[in-house]
Image (cartoon, grey):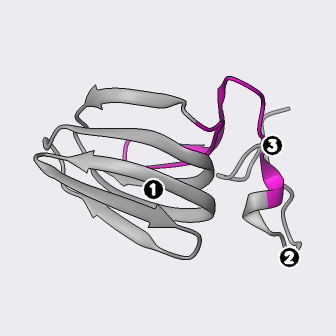
Amino acid sequence: MENKYKLKNIELSKILRLEDEISYQKGQIVSKTLVQNKHVSLTLFAFDKGEEISTHSSEGDAMVTGLDGKGRFTVGDEVFIVSKGETLIMPNQVPHAVYGEEQFKMLLTVVF
């Protein structure tokens, strides 16, 4: 039976702490997709310290919200440190990379 809801991999009709919905794994980057369609993508990430996603670009504008720890983002030629409770907007087509300064959890929202 097909799920009639747009969100997946997360409980509905319940108050949640997003940082508790994904766990760290030693030496890895863990991701959990909540929504993926032609308009928007919502993904939780957990980076172990020192793990990174190399430089890439996206067709959509991206908004990153820190949920735990600190991550370093290189967006074009600028570097930003994102901590819990902070949000960074990355425009489409601008190359960017992410590095776990320490263990770091984030919610990535991409709008296409």
Which residue is depicted at the point 56% across and 76% down?
85
Mark drawn on residue 23:
3
Q: Is residue 36 magenta?
A: yes
Which element type, helix, strand or loop, lies under badge 1? Answer: strand
Amino acid at pointer 3: Ser
Q: Residues within 10 Å of mark 3 (few under 14, many from 20)?
A: some
Q: The magenta stretch spans which residues? A: 20-49
Q: Tag 2 or tag 1, which sits nearer the N-term?
A: 2
Q: Is residue 5 magenta?
A: no
What residue does disc 1 label? 109
Amino acid at pointer 1: Thr
Which residue is depicted at the point 55% across and 64% down?
66
Q: Position of residue 97 (x, y in %)?
A: 32, 37
| Residue 2 located left or right of residue 51 | right
Mark 2 or mark 3, which is nearer to you? 3
Q: Is residue 80 above or below residue 34?
A: below
Cα–Cα span, label 2 and label 3: 18 Å
| Residue 93 located left or right of residue 98 | left
Mark 3 or mark 1, which is nearer to you? 3
Residue 46, picture quadrant: top right
Would residue 37 be seen by someone viewing this image from the given angle? no
Q: Position of residue 78 (x, y in %)?
A: 16, 54
Near-viewer residue (62 or 104): 104
Residue 76, picture quadrant: top left
What residue does disc 2 label? 15
**Quadrant occupied by the N terminus:** top right
| Residue 109 located left or right of residue 21 | left
Which element type, helix, strand or loop, lies under badge 2? Answer: loop
Q: Tag 1 or tag 3, which sits nearer the N-term?
A: 3
Cα–Cα span, label 1 and label 2: 19 Å
